[in-house]
Image (cartoon, rainbow, N blue to C red):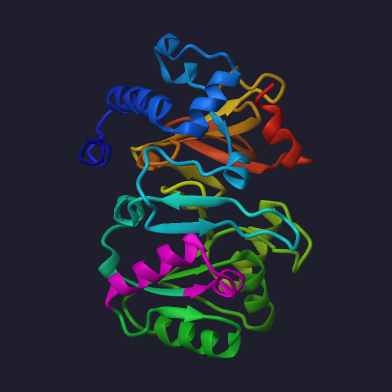
């Protein structure tokens, strides 16, 4: 009942109205979210605007089956994590909603997928099961209908040769990669790419020291010979993605919104340019939970844009503390 409306949102008023409807639906039909609201002694009838909605701490996906309704999931996505960590599990009832969300989101920002050749450098994700990112990129690769589109694991020399060959052709190229693998590539090969978008998905995965965005993007820009590094912001627990076309400033598709919560008061929100915890509304997530309090720090900018600054320290503890 929500699907047809979600991807046709044309205004902030339409977004807010649909978000309020989905909140009431999930408060009644999502057992985990319902219990969370009960612990807060929260009156759902008091919700008149989206800032009234309590956001579920993302850590709940590590401990509970966060699902709206009683259907059997078609897919279970697992978060990445170091050895010994509990992985988040996202039980997806209808993978076609995920597929529609990421395709429409990509084309909203970049145009038709068939215009691109996609080169994926995502070794840490390919080496494990249940990655929502691999599911998305694999499907987008297939939708390009290009023979040159594909995944590269650790064969950096072959990848470099492919990028240089494609650079001589008049076509759009998207190189999407995990951060440490992109750094490995430019440390061994230097490029002067003219028709390639370089997009990092974040993450050192314990392979390298963490770097601030300015330092990272400067190294990648010089290594690939491009003026901007694009970025993708998504997570296992969501079905939608935000994209940055440079300078670390992200924009959401019309069915997704970012709010910044006060780090001292999880139910208070901060104005633009003030740093706090990132709360995500993802209306495509209506079969799970559309209102998630992440462990990321950020701030909003004008025109529904935002910036990711990092993560909370001891975030595993802090997520559950939002219940208090």
**Quarter location, residue 75:** bottom left
Quarter in which the N terminus is drawn = top left
Confirm whether the magenta stretch covers residue 143.
Answer: yes
x%, y% of residue 148?
A: 37, 84
Secondary structure mostly seen in the magenta stretch: helix
Residue 231 appears left or right of 287: right
Residue 182 appears left or right of 164: right
Residue appearing at x 59%, y 51% in the figure: 88
x%, y% of residue 209?
A: 79, 62
Q: Is residue 143 above or below residue 151?
A: above
- Seen as rendered, the residue at the extreme top is 46
x%, y% of residue 266?
A: 63, 22
Q: Is residue 90 above or below residue 139?
A: above
Residue appearing at x 66%, y 42% in the figure: 309
Residue 33 appears left or right of 171: right
Confirm whether the magenta stretch covers residue 263.
Answer: no
Who is closer to the viewer here, 83 or 185?
83
Who is closer to the viewer here, 271 or 98?
98
Who is closer to the viewer here, 307 or 241?
241
x%, y% of residue 124?
A: 62, 71
Quarter in which the C terminus is drawn = top right
Residue appearing at x 47%, y 57% in the figure: 76
Who is closer to the viewer here, 67 or 108?
67
**Quarter location, residue 262:** top right
Residue interval drawn in magenta: 120-145
């Amino acid at each position: 009942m929500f699907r047809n409306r979600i991807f046709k949102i044309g205004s902030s008023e339409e977004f807010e109205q649909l978000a309020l409807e989905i909140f009431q639906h999930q408060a009644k039909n999502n057992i985990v979210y319902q219990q969370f609201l009960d612990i807060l002694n929260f009156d759902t009838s008091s919700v008149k605007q989206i800032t009234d909605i309590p956001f579920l701490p993302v850590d709940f996906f590590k401990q509970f089956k966060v699902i709206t309704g009683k259907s059997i999931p078609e897919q279970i996505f697992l978060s990445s994590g170091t050895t010994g960590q509990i992985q988040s599990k996202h039980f997806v009832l209808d993978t076609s909603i995920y597929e529609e969300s990421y395709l429409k989101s990509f084309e909203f920002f970049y145009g038709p997928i068939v215009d691109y050749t996609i080169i994926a450098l995502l070794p840490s994700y390919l080496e494990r099961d249940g990655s929502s990112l691999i599911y998305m990129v694999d499907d987008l690769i297939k939708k390009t209908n290009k023979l040159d589109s594909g995944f590269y694991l650790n064969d950096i020399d072959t990848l470099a040769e492919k990028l240089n060959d494609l650079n001589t052709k008049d076509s759009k190229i998207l190189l999407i990669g995990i951060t440490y693998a992109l750094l490995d590539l430019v440390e061994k090969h230097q490029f002067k790419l003219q028709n390639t978008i370089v997009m990092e998905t974040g993450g050192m995965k314990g392979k390298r020291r963490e770097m601030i965005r300015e330092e990272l993007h400067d190294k990648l820009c010089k290594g690939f010979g491009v003026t901007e590094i694009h970025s993708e912001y998504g997570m296992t627990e969501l079905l939608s993605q935000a994209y940055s076309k440079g300078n670390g400033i992200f924009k959401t598709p019309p069915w997704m919104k970012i709010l910044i919560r006060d780090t001292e008061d999880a139910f208070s929100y901060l104005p633009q340019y003030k740093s706090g915890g990132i709360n995500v509304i993802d209306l495509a997530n209506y079969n799970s939970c559309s209102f998630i309090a992440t462990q990321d720090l950020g701030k909003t900018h004008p025109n529904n844009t935002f910036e990711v600054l990092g993560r909370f320290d001891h975030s595993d503890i802090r997520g559950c503390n939002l219940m208090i």
